[in-house]
Amino acid sequence: NVLVENAGDITATAELGRAFGIGAYTPWGNLDIVNIGDVTVTAPENATGIAAVTEGYSGEYYYFPADISIANGGQISVSSENGRSTGISATTTYGDVSFEISGSVDVAGADRSTGLSASSLYGDVAIYTDADITVSSGSEYALGISTFSDYGDVNVVNYGGIEVSGTSLTQGVLARSNYGHVTVVNYGDISADSSAGYSNAVAVQSGDQGASIVNYGSL
């Protein structure tokens, strides 16, 4: 298992290539990241504030889930001149993903830009945020919160303001599961603006288990 705790400010600047503020990887174990410091990342190509990747294992005789938990209370600021920008990203294969976000996330990219990205192939995905999320993209898509599980449930609870702008597809919250149930509960103000494409404040996709959207905010 891997535990990352940070209380200081982090600045990562790349003159060439990519840049990460905090990155954690393990092939088998759980990943836990707790950050209360400000993270600023700038790169000419892809830029990511916090990234966590694990896999787990499933075989004929053994099953080892690998969960990811991220708690962020710091301000995340990510920008890319020519590539993709992501505020906080987590990906696992055989585990659950959970986010608790109370610090603001500001993302700007020339290509695809995403504020929060969480995905699992076989596990559940749960996002709780009461932070402001601002995302802009010069081309391709711009997503405030993007969640996906193939076989698990997806739950998103948002209390913060989400503002997304771009020239292509823009979505404030995108929640998807092929075989699980999808739930989005929103208490905040969400806006998605596209100058030349489609825009959705909240978009859900689910299979047989269905989906539900409960909105108390402004869309």
Image (cartoon, rainbow, N blue to C red):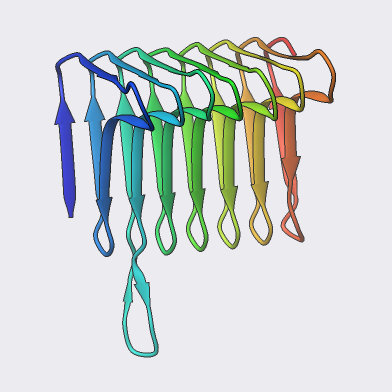
Going 84% across and 23% down the picture, which residue do you hit?
Answer: 197
Q: Nearer the viewer, residue 101 or 26?
A: 26
The quadrant in which the C terminus is found is top right
Q: How many marks?
A: 0
Where residue 180 appears, as percent x and y from the top left, is 64, 57
Q: Kindly give the residue lying farthest to the front in the view shown.
A: 16
94 in relation to 114, above or below: below
Side of 168 relative to 55 (left or right): right
Going 24% across and 25% down the picture, which residue do you hit?
Answer: 35
Where residue 124 appears, as percent x and y from the top left, is 49, 53
Going 40% across and 59% down the picture, which residue do you hit?
Answer: 95
Side of 156 relative to 193 (left or right): left
The quadrant in which the N terminus is found is bottom left
81 in relation to 46, above or below: above
Where residue 143 appears, as percent x and y from the top left, is 63, 27
Q: Nearer the viewer, residue 202 or 84?
A: 84
Where residue 125 appears, as percent x and y from the top left, is 50, 46
